[in-house]
Image (cartoon, rainbow, N blue to C red):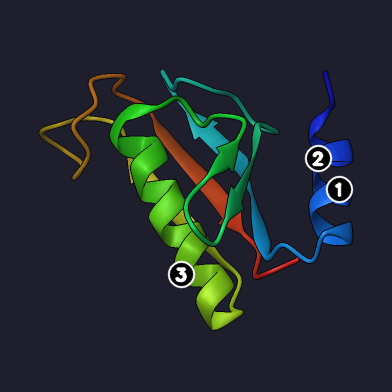
Amino acid sequence: MKNIFETIADLIKAGEPLALATIIRTKGSTPRKVGTKVVILKEGNIFGTMGEGDLEKKVIEEAIDAIRKGEPGTISFTLDIEKGKLDMMCGGELDAFKPPQI
């Protein structure tokens, strides 16, 4: 099984536009921890996981937007259906970095 960096190298060699979303901060209960990485392709295919569900869906949307615009950014999530805008019950918070196309 390839590691994420081998996958990235193969995709770059193939000329595939991609983004690498990385969790850079967590607080409380979250499905993944700091350092978790997910490769997202411009069509929405992914390698890795941020924890599935609404969180992963939103990370994919944001990464596709970063690829399209070529603009990096940080996105923050509250993982609580009542406090945040995601249908998740973890209760924690996390920030993810979304670089533009690699």
The extreme front residue here reads 14
Label 1: few (<14), some or many (≥20) within 10 Å?
Answer: few
Residues at discs 2 and 1 in contact (Cβ within 8 Å): yes
**Residue bearing mark 1:** 10
Q: Is residue 28 left or right of residue 1?
A: left
Residue drawn 54% across the image and 23% down it: 32
Question: Is disc 2 in contact with disc 3, using a CB cutoff of under 8 Å?
Answer: no
User: How many marks do you count on the picture?
Assistant: 3
Residue at label 3?
A: 65
Q: Nearer the viewer, mark 3 or mark 1?
A: 1
Q: Relative to residue 78, is residue 52 drawn left or right?
A: right
Counting residues from the N terminus, which is met first, the one under dot 2 or under dot 3? 2
Whole-percent x and y of residue 73? 55, 67
At numbered mark 3, what does the secondary structure look like: helix, strand or loop?
A: helix
Residues 41 and 23: in front is 41
What residue is pinned by disc 2?
A: 7
